[in-house]
Amino acid sequence: MAPRLLVYTRTTAYRHDSIPDAVAALRTLDPDGLAVDATENPAALEADLTPYAAVVFLSTSGDVLTDAGRARLTAYVEGGGGFAGVHAATCTEYGWPYFGELLGARFTRHPAYQPGRVVVEDRAHPATAHLPATWQFTDEWYDFDTNPRATAHILLRADESSYDGGGMGADHPLAWYRAQGAGRVFYTALGHASPAYADPAFRAHLLGGLRWAAGLAHPSGPAHPSGA
């Protein structure tokens, strides 16, 4: 039986039009290797999560969990479960401090949706092994409240000289992975619009991150800087 992902897309703030296309894309990324259960019902996060190889927050926004769901997700990740956040996952649960720690940073703002350049910092990870040293992409180029480099292994960063309105400077992480307790956490800020989910390079990026979060693929680098 294929490992299963629980893909959660509930929104109580901004809702991305791309969510249906994103869910459809996840179902086809690795149909023989990863099965997808998609839901917007918070009760799904209150149930036993151990049958899932990873929980994926896909462009969630606002407060999307009950207290019971927060407790269940915490126990799941700390106990060794996988977690992946895509795009607006960092716009979620601002009032729950643990969720910010889990992801490594929170969204603050973005400039206009526009083309730009992604710098690939690490090609040893399955989310980036297929990418060139620089990657042209179109997205919203999220800024964050903190630089996650201290607690996460950075995979991609934005080249702010390649687009207008960047707010983090020369060191602007876009995708990373980290350990949380015994769990595995992957996050990518990319994936705002539907065309991303038809783009082969982005789909491979997403699949690599999901497979790693699910414990099905392994990078050669550490989960934390300096192996911490």
Image (cartoon, rainbow, N blue to C red):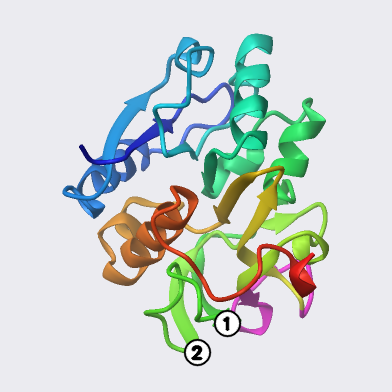
Decide if residue 151 is on the left or right side of residue 21. right
Q: Is residue 159 magenta?
A: yes
Q: CA distance from mark 1 to mark 2?
A: 6 Å
Q: Nearer the viewer, residue 221 or 206?
A: 221
Nearer-N-terminus badge (1/2): 1
Judged from the image, the secondary structure of the residue bearing numbered disc 2 is loop
Q: Amino acid at mark 1?
A: Val
Q: Which residues are magenta?
A: 157-170
Element class at badge 1: strand
Q: Position of residue 143 (x, y in %)?
A: 71, 58
Q: Answer yes or no: is residue 110 visible.
A: no
Residue 55: image tag: none
**Residues at discs 1 and 2 in contact (Cβ within 8 Å):** yes
Q: Amino acid at mark 2?
A: Ala
- Residue at 77% across, 26% down: 96
Kindly identify the residue that appears in the image at 61 percent across and 81 percent down.
121
Horizontal relation, residue 202 to residue 144: left or right: left
Q: Decide which of 122, 188 is in the foreground and name it.
A: 122
Location of residue 12 with respect to 207 vertically, above or below: above
Label 2: few (<14), some (14–19) or many (≥20) C-alpha neighbours in 10 Å = few
Q: Is residue 5 left or right of residue 64?
A: left
The residue indicated by pointer 1 is 119
Q: Which quadrant, please, contains the C terminus?
A: bottom right
Q: Residue furthest bottom?
A: 133
Residue 84 in sight:
yes
Q: Quadrant of residue 89?
A: top right
Query: Dot 1 surroundings within 10 Å: few (below 14), some, or many (20 or more)?
Result: some
Q: Which residue is mark 2?
A: 133
Residue 32 percent coordinates (x, y): 16, 49
Q: Residue at x 57, y 80 (%)?
A: 122
Where residue 84 appears, as percent x and y from the top left, is 52, 46
**Residue ID at (36%, 43%):** 18
